[in-house]
Amino acid sequence: MLQTDVPPVRRRTGLRAALGRARPGARPLRFQTVTTTAAARQVAALGLDGVHVTAATAGMEEPVALTARIVRATPLPVLVDLGGDGDADDVARFESAGASGVHLDDTDPADYAADDVAARVRAAVRVRHDPDLLIGVRTTAGAAGGLIETIDRARACVGAGADVIVVEAPVSRTAYTVLREALAVPLLVTATTVTGGDPTPVLLPTVTQLAALGMDVVIHPVTGPRAPAATDRGRRDPRDAGTPRGPAGVLPPGAHGGDRTRDRAAAPAGGGHR
C-alpha cells in the first residue's frame, strides 16, 4: 500500500535533490498531468515519479483545493502549471496547498516583455516560504522569435531566480541539444507531438532518447503517454521500458530506482547544464 502522508516539505527537498544529483544519462523523471484525485492515485500506483496539475484546466473543482486533495491522496511531488495569469499570490496559495513546485507561463512573448516575466519570477521567489519550492517558467521553443529569443528569455528568468525551465514544443532534436547546452538549470519537457522544423518533422523522442538529449523531466498530458511519442516504440505503459527513477525520499521504500540526474559539474563553459 502506498504511503500517502509524506509531508510537502519532504517531497520538495526530495524532488530538488533528485534534480540536482549527479547521474549522467539517467532517465528523466516521469510526471503525469491529472484532473482528479483518482487519476493521481493511479499515477502513484503505476510507479511514476510525480503529478502535474494545470490550474486553468482543473475541471469544475477549484484548482487550489484540487491540488490539496491530490497532495493528501498520493505520496508524489505535485507540480502546478499556473498558466499565463499566474502571479505571486497564486504561488503562495499553491505552496500552502502542498505543491512541490509551480511554473509560470512565457509561451507567448507578444503578451509580456522579457522584463515583465522576469519580474513575475522575482515576485514568486520572494513570496515562497519554503526555499525548496521549485519556481519554474514554461516557454515555447517554437515561438515566433525563434530559438535564440526563447533562450534569451529563459536565461533572464533563471537570472531572476527560476529553478527550472519547462520546454514546450521543440521543433527538432537539434532544438533539445541547443537548449540543453544553453541553460544551466533542469529542463522539463511537455510530451506533445511536434511537426515541422529543422531538419525534418519529428515526434517527441522516446524517454530513452530524452535522457540522451539531457532532459530532466517529461510531463505527460492528461491523455497519458502514447506510443511512439514519449514511450519506447510499441509500448503503452507510461513507465516506459525499465524502472522509472524517482526522487530519493519522496516515494515509499522500493517504489523508486535511486539517483538519476546528470553531473552539473561537467557543464560546458558558458553555463550549459551538461
Image: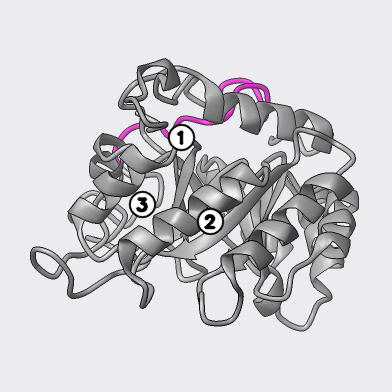
**Residue 93: x %, y % from top left:** 89, 59
Q: Is residue 237 magenta?
A: no
Can you identify the residue that label 3 sits on? 237
| Residue 272, horizontal then vertical, whole percent | 37, 33
Q: CA distance from mark 1 to mark 3?
A: 31 Å
Query: Residue at the location (63% across, 20% down)?
Result: 253
Q: Is residue 153 visible?
A: yes
Q: Residues within 10 Å of mark 2 (few under 14, many from 20)?
A: many
- Three-letter amino acid code at the position of disc 1: Ala
User: Could you tell me the amino acid type at mark 3?
Assistant: Asp
State the extent of the magenta-drawn residues as a range: 241-255
Report the disc number at residue 109.
Answer: none
In this view, the residue in front, 153 or 132, is 153
Earlier along the polypeptide chain: callout 1 or callout 2?
A: 2
Q: Is residue 93 left or right of residue 265?
A: right
Q: Secondary structure at mark 1?
A: loop
Residue 211 in which image quadrant = top left
Q: Earlier in the sequence, mark 3 or mark 2?
A: 2
Which residue shows up at 78% across the image and 46% down it?
Answer: 125
- Closer to viewer: mark 1 or mark 2: 1
Q: Residue 32, labelled with which disc? A: 2
Foreground mark, 1 or 3, reads 1
